[in-house]
Each structure stands twice: as C-alpha cells, then as structure tokens.
Amino acid sequence: MSEAQAAPETPRAYEPCLCREVLRKIDQFFTVKSDAAREHFRTSRLEFPKAVRTLIDERIEKLSHTGQAGAKITVE
C-alpha cells in the first residue's frame, strides 16, 4: 500500500483509567513551580550522595583501625 492510499491516523481517545489518573495526580503533586524550591532540590541532589559517601568513609575508617590484639596468657 502506498503512502497516498494509507488511512490517516486518527487520535486515540482514552477511557478513564485509574492508573493513568493516579500517575497524572502524582505528576501534578511533584511538579516544582518555584525556582527557589528547584534550586534546593538541585543542591540536595548533590548533597545526599556526599552524605552517603561520608557515612561510608567513616565506616571504612572504623573497620580499618586494628584494635588492640588479645592479651597473651600462659596456659599450664
């Protein structure tokens, strides 16, 4: 079938769907309209991984310190 003979696409009409409506509401809820709020989110996107890295570094430091070896005792 050639392009001239092809049927034109008609826009699809969607029936109301619970999932679609929930996703639309979630999108509306989390849409950031304020520039100040957007800047805070951008900054936190950088700060959160830094905080996790700090926690990991502290844990590695704690685990890498060798504690005092056990005391020697003589067994008769």
Image (cartoon, rainbow, N blue to C red):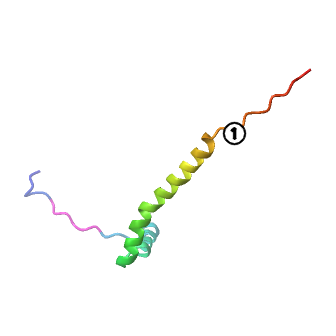
- Label 1: element kind: loop
Neighbor class of circle 1 (other Cα within 10 Å; few <14, some 14-19, many 20+) is few
Q: Position of residue 21 (x, y in %)?
A: 43, 72
Residue most toward the top? 76
Residue 13 visible in the shown view: yes
Quarter of the figure with residue 40? bottom left
Give the residue type at disc 1. Gly
Residue positioned 72% across, 37% down in the render: 68
What residue range appears in magenta?
7-12
Residue at the image point whose x is 48% and y is 60% from the top:
48
Coordinates of residue 24 in the picture (x, y in percent): 40, 72
Q: Is residue 33 visible?
A: no
Q: Is residue 46 left or right of residue 63?
A: left
Give residue 6's position: percent from left, percent from top.
13, 57
- Give the quadrant of the C terminus: top right
Above or below: residue 24 compared with residue 7: below
Residue visible at 19% across and 63% down in the picture: 9
Residue tagged 1: 67
